Image (tube, helix red, strand yellow):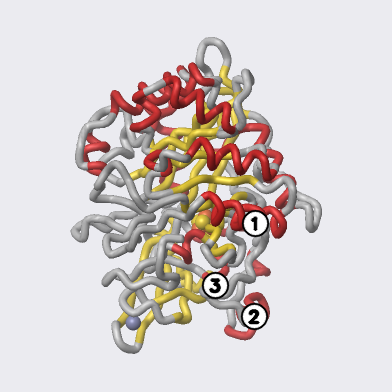
Amino acid sequence: MNLICKTRSVCPVCLRELPAELTEHPDGIYMEKVCADHGRFETLIWQDDGAGFLQWMTRGGCPPETLPLTEEQLEAQLSGAGFTCDACQSPSSAALMTTNRCNMNCPVCFTRDRQEALHEPSLEECESLLRNYRERAGDDALLEFCGGEPTVREDLPALAQLARNIGFDYIQLNTNGIRLSESVSYCSQLREAGITTVYLGFDGVTDHPYQIKYGRSLLEEKKRAVDNCEAAGLAVVLVVCVIPGENDGELGEIIRYAKANVPTVKGVYLQPISYFGIYPEDIRKRITIPELIRRLADQCGDISEGDFGPCSYEHPQCSFNACYLVDREGTLWSLSEPFSSRCVEGQCAGRIRKVLRNTWMPSRTRMLTIGGMAFQDAWNIDLLRVRRCSIQVIQKDGRLIPLCSKYLSSCGGGKLFPGIG
Ligand code: SF4
Ligand SMILES: [Zn+2]
């Protein structure tokens, strides 16, 4: 098989750091690695040929001549960094883990861990973590509230107010939407307190994907949550956990629903299922970025594969994005590539934060972003990607940890970074 580049990964059983190679196979690009104790692992990471992969990498600022082909070249790029150091670039956005309590008990969950002790930092603890994050990341830092389910905290409006008083103007709530579906006045309370954007789990337009992911039907609650956000002036990004064979046929209908709800809905963000946290042991199906783009183009007449590009900030294998205007008839018109245009050295974080503010804050603009992020798990994690992480978690000790390292779990539930916060 053709070697594309060398990198570092981990053993999915013992999480030991391992040398790894990306290689071209007839059906796509694979990561290959060997643990002396647990054997060989081969994982599909990119459903395209070598030429297509290299073209995408080049557009994301990693042309072939920069890809390490020897251990020496790899070491020169990593400069001694490993999975547990916090020497990554400044994030475009960081997540505060507000609680690990949840109002659901889903069979699939990225962030929770069944053995976890209660984690719910007090307002005082949150204040100190947020001030520390802003000091490190700058005045334009973006903030996300994650969980568990943040809305189970009765003091969530007070927490949003606190963050706004510190100076955060973009505050994103990552939620299953159940509490938001129950009351417009609760949504208004959140908006008035400072929440700008609701990052809403929205896995399809039929009940089937909700049965798979949450273990129950939830479509009506999701739609009510969007309606209530609209009434309260909150922006919404629909977040789709894409599970091959379960909801990858619904992408076109999800986009149509999003278009019908512009300008409240600002984006559709696809996250191919990855295997960390809680997931059914009997599935480990993969769908990767180029295949997601093909499905979007196949299922939507006004989307073409060429609309999409990598983000210039995170690693090109991490994400894909396109930006559109939606006309009154509901047709998408592709805009130039705001996520992927080149940035001046050292100003990249600021530029990408500005793009997210412009596209995901409440406004009457009929813009819609469509994109996604391929979170990594113990089978495919790649240290070169982690080093360019843009979404980091604010740990309770104040460190900023790339989300993929923070929640990485082995087959047996072992963690690199124990604890949710
Ligand atoms: S969270 Fe993971 S997939 Fe996203 S930018 Fe960071 S390393 Fe890449
Ligand atoms: Zn091992």
Gap in angstroms between the C-alphas marked 2 and 1? 33 Å
Residues tagged 3 and 1 counted as in contact (Cβ below 8 A): no
Residues tagged 3 and 2 counted as in contact (Cβ below 8 A): no
Gap in angstroms between the C-alphas marked 3 and 1? 34 Å
Residue situated in front as seen by the camera: 73 or 272: 272
| Above or below for 207 versus 241 | above
Dot 1, crowdedness within 10 Å: few (<14), some or many (≥20)? many
**Number of callouts in the render?**
3
Q: Residue at x 63, y 32 (%)?
A: 359
Q: Quadrant of residue 358?
A: top right
Dot 3, crowdedness within 10 Å: few (<14), some or many (≥20)? many
The type of residue carrying mark 2 is Gln
Label 3 sits on a secondary structure element that is strand
Of the image marks 2 and 1, the number of the one nearer the N terminus: 2
Residue situated in front as seen by the camera: 298 or 256: 256
Gap in angstroms between the C-alphas marked 3 and 2? 10 Å
Label 2 sits on a secondary structure element that is helix
Image location of residue 413, percent across then percent down = 30, 69
Q: Residue at x 38, y 55 (%)?
A: 111
Q: Residue at x 58, y 55 (%)?
A: 316
Image location of residue 317, percent across then percent down = 53, 57
The type of residue carrying mark 1 is Tyr
Q: Residue at x 52, y 75 (%)?
A: 84
* Side (left or right) of 402 relative to 164: left
| Above or below for 252 versus 286 | above
Dot 2, crowdedness within 10 Å: few (<14), some or many (≥20)? some
Question: Is the distance from the Cβ of mark 2 to the nearest ligand 1 atom less than 8 Å?
Answer: no
Q: Which residue is mark 1?
A: 133
Q: Which residue is mark 2?
A: 73
Label 1 sits on a secondary structure element that is helix
Image location of residue 10, percent across then percent down = 42, 75
Between label 2 and label 1, give the one nearer the viewer.
1
